[in-house]
Amino acid sequence: MDGDDQDEQRAGASAPPAPWEFVLPEETATEDLGLFLSEFLLPGDVVALSGGLGGGKTTLARAVIRELAGDPRLEVPSPTFTLIQPYTARDGRAIVHADLYRLRDPDELVELGFDEMAEDAITLVEWPDRMPPRDGPVLTIDLSLRAEFGAEARLARIDGTGGMRARLDRARAVRRLLDRSGWDIAERTLMQGDASSRAYERLTKPDGTSAVLMIAPPRPDGPPVRDGKPYSAIVHLAESVHAFVALDRGLRALGFSAPKIYGEDLSEGLLILEDLGREPVVEGGAPRPERYTEAVRLLAKLHATPLPAVLPVADGIEHVLPVYDEAALLFEAELMPEWYAPAIRNVTLSEGARAEFVALWRTALQNAIPDRATWTLRDYHSPNLIWLPEREGLERVGLIDFQDAVMGHPAYDVASLLQDARVDSSAEFELRLLGLYARERRSRDPAFDVGAFATAYALLAAQRATKILGIFARLERRDGKPGYLAHLPRIEGYLTRNLAHPALAELRAWHAAHLPGLVAPEEEA
């Protein structure tokens, strides 16, 4: 290959993707396109509709608005004379439909309050060339009459900026997956998400059959935070759905109730999963004892089983579970002095105090090195456990959200369950279920060391509480999600409880010295 060919290949590799072009043979196809677009539009998006008179811009806008509003008969006239017409979606989102054909000067938009209306709305703009350039996501759609394909045929040319093109391509991938998996006729309902970047939708067919669509595109690397590595790499967060697929099949092979996978697109991070339902293991913010009992027994069985660190994903693809190593555990613990101390306690720690904190944790964690590492699901707590009363035994405990699993100490997941950030769990209840776990483990493994496990449990429960305090403070301060702060008193209580263990005496003294008020007076030494 000569130099010119190499330059051309490099240029082609970095060139932006070509616009999506296709023919709309009749008006109903234009309306179907509107239904598709409505699936991924978000507040703040602008849909720029270009094309000549009679090209179908208003027909497309009308279809989008009716679908978002949930009213197929909603009157949606062309705003040619009013210029701007507001609507409200069925979920309360604002919609703005603008036709700028008669706009004489862009300053008129200021007088009409267009920027304020469009800031948090899904905005559809006909004749967008008369609108000043805008920041943020813009979906561009050009419609042109193409008589050679039929009297009503139009050529659609679609592209996007500000991250819109990636969303468009993902929406197309979702549509292809739904089509080939037999879920194309299902109604899609957005489910409540979590603190991650993943999104979930419940799919419901006309006969009532349901499934869950997981949208988890490959995680881009964040900025380096230590030793040139991003946060996700240091603490071993899953980079793709490969981890979920591997663990899902591994758990199901062991007889546990992880969701069946009905369809997948690994490259796009899309999965169609069995809907395990919505029956919780808690009631009124408190554990349901019989359900927690089975959840503890499940862990005892899992931890007593020799488990591989490498799992198959697909032909030629394997997932290696990373080790939950000291570097990850320490970095997570450091979220407390970095975020919780200044944001919640209004305490700025000196470099010396922070260095002492890390040194104490490094020493303490030597007592939490497992003799035999096991699958640590990491988020084994009430939001990710679903009760399946129609099943038998341990299969009644449904498992979800385990893609960040690592090879770690068995005590970590027991602590995740019994010291749930969202659940009020008394010390007495916790101790009773710890006893159950120890009995179940010993029945399967007579060599199980209860004393060593109890020490590791206190250490890892304290580490987890420390980490969560930092994460929830970060979610409020950095990400604008204050709802997580409501859980802080509960987590602080768990941490105080854990710091009472003799193995954590020096860390307890550090907290008493540097974060006064966090450690209860009777716990101070």
Image (cartoon, helix red, strand yellow):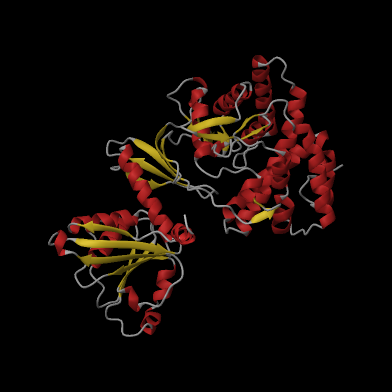
Residue 428: percent from left, percent from top = 69, 30
Residue 82: percent from left, percent from top = 27, 77
Seen in the image, is 498 located left or right of residue 382? right
Q: Quadrant of residue 523?
A: top right
Q: In which quarter of the image is residue 414?
A: top right
Residue 263: percent from left, percent from top = 38, 37
The residue at the point 43 percent across, 56 percent down is 166
The residue at the point 47 percent across, 59 percent down is 14
Q: Is residue 161 visible?
A: yes
User: Which quadrant is home to the C terminus?
Assistant: top right
Relative to residue 512, is residue 154 depicted above or below?
below
Q: In which quarter of the image is residue 309?
A: top right
Residue 139: percent from left, percent from top = 37, 64
Seen in the image, is 192 located left or right of residue 440? left
Seen in the image, is 181 located left or right of residue 473? left
The residue at the point 43 percent across, 35 percent down is 277
Relative to residue 309, is residue 234 depicted above or below?
below
